Each structure stands twice: as structure tokens, then as C-alpha cells.
Image: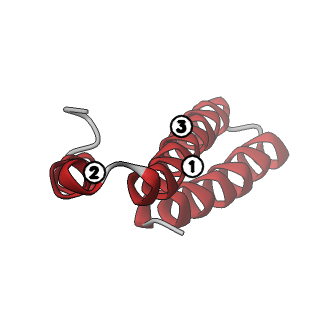
Amino acid sequence: MTDQRIEGAADQIEGKVQSDLGRLTGDTRAQVEGKLKQAKGQALDAYGRVIDGLDGLVEKAPADLREPARTGLDFARRKPLLT
């Protein structure tokens, strides 16, 4: 499991709690911020799932392409917004 998936799950939970607390207290801003954090968490989780899937494909790639593919995946992990 990648760091993006862990961070994404944490953001989803935090966003849900924030949104629910905002709803209970009538704080519209907290509700919106919570929903945005949930969406960010879902996006990070999806990105992490893609990276995890690509890890499996790298192992099946021809030997001469494995190292460049791993380098590309390492870059994608470090710079998700640029990817």
C-alpha cells in the first residue's frame, strides 16, 4: 500500500468527521471544507491504487525496461501533482 492510499484514507475520514460536525453545529463552512477534504482523500486513494497497479506491471515488463519504469514510478510517488 502506498503512502498516497494511507494519506487518502486519513483525509477521507477526517473530512467525513469535519463535515458531520459542521452539519451538527450548523457550520456550513466546516461542512464544505469537510466535503473538499473527503474528495481530496478519494483522489489520493485512487492515485495510490493506480501506482500500486503499475508496480505489478513493472515486474512483468521486459528486463531492459524495468529500471526506467521503476524510476518513473518513483518520480510519480514523489510528485503526484506533476504526474
Q: Nearer the viewer, residue 58 or 53?
A: 58
- Residue 27: give x, y in percent of width and height: 67, 38
How far apart in space, not on screen, are marks 3 and 2 (Cα)? 18 Å
Which quadrant of the structure image shows residue 9? bottom right
Amino acid carrying label 1: it is: Arg
The residue located at (20%, 46%) in the rendering is 72
Residue sitting at the far right: 24
Amino acid carrying label 2: it is: Leu
Q: State left or right for residue 69 relative to residue 3.
A: left
- Is label 3 in a helix, a strand or a loop? helix
The residue located at (42%, 66%) in the rendering is 3
Amino acid carrying label 3: it is: Ala
Can see residue 75? no
Residue where numbered disc 3 is placed: 43
On residue 49, which mark appears? 1
User: Is there a contact, CB below 8 Å, between mark 3 and mark 1?
Assistant: no
Please tell me whether residue 39 is drawn above or below residue 1 in the rendered image: above
- Residue 7: give x, y in percent of width and height: 48, 62
- Is label 1 in a helix, a strand or a loop? helix
- Residue 21: give x, y in percent of width and height: 75, 53
Residue where numbered disc 2 is placed: 73
Of the two numbered discs 1 and 2 on the same chain, state the one appearing first in sequence: 1
Q: State left or right for residue 45 relative to residue 65.
A: right
Of the two numbered discs 3 and 1 on the same chain, state the one appearing first in sequence: 3
The residue located at (72%, 50%) in the rendering is 16
- Residue 13: give x, y in percent of width and height: 68, 59
How far apart in space, not on screen, are marks 3 and 1 (Cα)? 10 Å
Q: Of tags 3 and 2, which is closer to the observer? A: 2
